Image (spheres, rainbow, N blue to C red):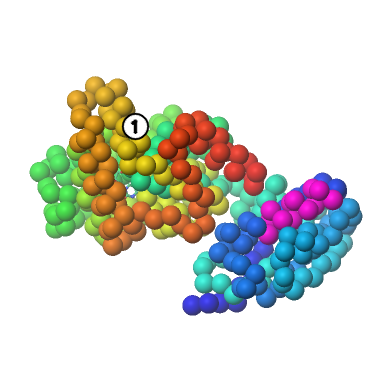
């Protein structure tokens, strides 16, 4: 249902024409992108700037960027202790997605409720390099990494160990009810505990991955693991990888990325990884597994693998993990 909404945003800039122009344009672009807006949805945009912004009119930057919408600007009173060099906007628009306010380049401090922790959602198919990239990003930005696949893998492992078919709803339900799946951090490293049993070291096999993929299609499984994931993200600044983080688990994540790569490249990466670990595998089997898991993960009825409309897509086929991580870090730093 389309609603009339007000979206807030702010950015800081130096008092030069170039800085005001680029900061304002970026703020408007980000607000449009994160709220799926175009000029047709806009009722008006109101802009205020602190009294030290004198080199250029921020509204002019919006007009000159080609936005043919009603604009209004004003200067804020100088209040001691307030953020300097700040441009704020209020965008009134018709929208049918949850609204997202946007604070860039240090302006998050204006909102004590959001200035602390932030979340980066990293979704994509298996083998796109999410976990390698997430670890690098976590280290560089000093945030905590949550690997949500490990939760589904833990359940897949328990199913295999108990000779339960991962699609057997009745028995998986029995397993999940007492199987209190928990994530704990041990020196910054994630460990997954099921019913007091630390399964972390036993979940990285192809067999477990396939069982996880099947069990993850059961709606009650997803429902049950939702709170575990959200609670974790509430406590820390996080990078969370998975299939439905930007769409379902953390739809309001400040940053969303969707990492892809061709099935062949992903299979080759998985193959190298498994061989390095001493698992005897055949490339074609790995490729078939990748394709089968893609199909399972993207066609299930609940929370299928899907790019969130406001996620930035990165095709990592011809990029190293370091390059992908650098791209993510740069985007995040640009906004913080
Ligand atoms: O990312 P991974 O390979 O460790 O994930 C194992 C399986 O778990 C994957 O095939 C699908 C499922 N999964 C999911 O459905 N949702 C997530 N957020 C993470 C994983």
* Residue 79 appears in the picture as rendered: no
Residue 27 falls inside the magenta stretch: yes
Name the main secondary structure of what is drawn in magenta: helix
Residue 15, how many percent across, how many down? Answer: 85, 48
Q: Residue furthest left?
A: 163
Give the residue at x 22% y 25%.
279
Q: Nearer the viewer, residue 288 or 250?
A: 288
Asked if residue 299 shows in the view, the reply is yes
Q: Residues within 10 Å of mark 1 (few under 14, many from 20)?
A: some
Question: Which residue is at 34% across, 32% downward?
Answer: 269
What residue is drawn where x is 16% and y is 53%? 167
Taking the image as shown, residue 54 lies to the left or right of residue 37, namely right
Q: Which residues are magenta?
A: 17-28
Q: Is 13 above or below relative to 199?
A: below
User: Horizontally, is 184 left or right of 111 in the view?
Assistant: left
Q: Is residue 231 left or right of residue 56?
A: left
| Residue 101 coordinates in the image, percent (x, y) | 62, 60
Q: Quadrant of residue 183?
A: top left
As for residue 91 lying within the magenta part, the answer is no
Instruction: Identify the image quadrant of residue 93.
Output: bottom right
Task: Identify the residue at horizontal 63%, vertical 50% (top origin).
Answer: 115
Q: Quadrant of the C terminus?
A: top right
**Residue 73 coordinates in the image, percent (x, y):** 82, 67
Q: Position of residue 97 (x, y in %)?
A: 51, 68
User: Ligand 1: does it lie within 8 Å of the C-beta at label 1?
Assistant: no
In the depicted structure, whether residue 111 falls above or below residue 320: below
User: Which residue carries the number 1 mark?
Assistant: 269
Label 1 secondary element: helix
Along the line of sight, the residue nearer the viewer: 214 or 107: 214
């Amino acid at each position: 249902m389309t609603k009339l909404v007000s979206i807030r945003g702010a950015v800081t800039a130096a008092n030069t024409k170039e800085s005001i122009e680029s900061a304002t344009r970026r703020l408007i672009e980000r607000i449009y992108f994160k709220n799926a807006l175009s000029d047709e949805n806009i009722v008006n945009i109101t802009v205020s700037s602190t009294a030290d912004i004198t080199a250029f009119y921020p509204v002019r930057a919006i007009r000159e960027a080609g936005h043919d919408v009603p604009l209004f600007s004003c200067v804020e009173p100088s209040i001691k202790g307030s953020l300097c060099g700040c441009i704020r906007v209020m965008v009134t628009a018709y929208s049918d997605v949850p609204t997202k306010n946007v604070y860039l380049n240090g302006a998050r401090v204006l909102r004590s409720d959001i200035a602390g922790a932030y979340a980066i959602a990293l979704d994509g198919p298996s083998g796109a390099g999410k976990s390698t990239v997430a670890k690098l990003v976590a280290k560089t930005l000093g945030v905590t990494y949550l690997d949500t696949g490990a939760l589904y893998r833990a359940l897949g492992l328990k199913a295999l160990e108990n000779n339960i078919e991962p699609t057997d709803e009745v028995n998986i339900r029995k397993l999940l009810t007492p199987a209190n799946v928990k994530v704990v951090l041990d020196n910054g490293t994630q460990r997954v505990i099921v019913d007091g049993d630390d399964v972390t070291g036993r979940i990285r096999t192809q067999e477990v991955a396939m069982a996880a993929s099947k069990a993850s299609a059961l709606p009650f499984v997803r429902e049950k693991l939702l709170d575990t994931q959200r609670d974790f993200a509430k406590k820390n600044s996080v990078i969370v990888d998975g299939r439905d983080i930007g769409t379902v688990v953390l739809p309001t994540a400040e940053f969303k990325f969707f990492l892809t790569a061709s099935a062949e490249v992903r299979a080759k990466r998985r193959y190298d990884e498994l061989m390095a670990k001493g698992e005897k595998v055949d490339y074609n089997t790995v490729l078939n597994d990748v394709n089968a898991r893609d199909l399972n993960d993207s066609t299930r009825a609940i929370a299928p693998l899907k790019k969130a409309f406001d996620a930035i897509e990165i095709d990592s086929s011809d990029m190293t993990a370091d390059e992908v991580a650098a791209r993510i870090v740069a985007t995040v730093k640009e906004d913080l």
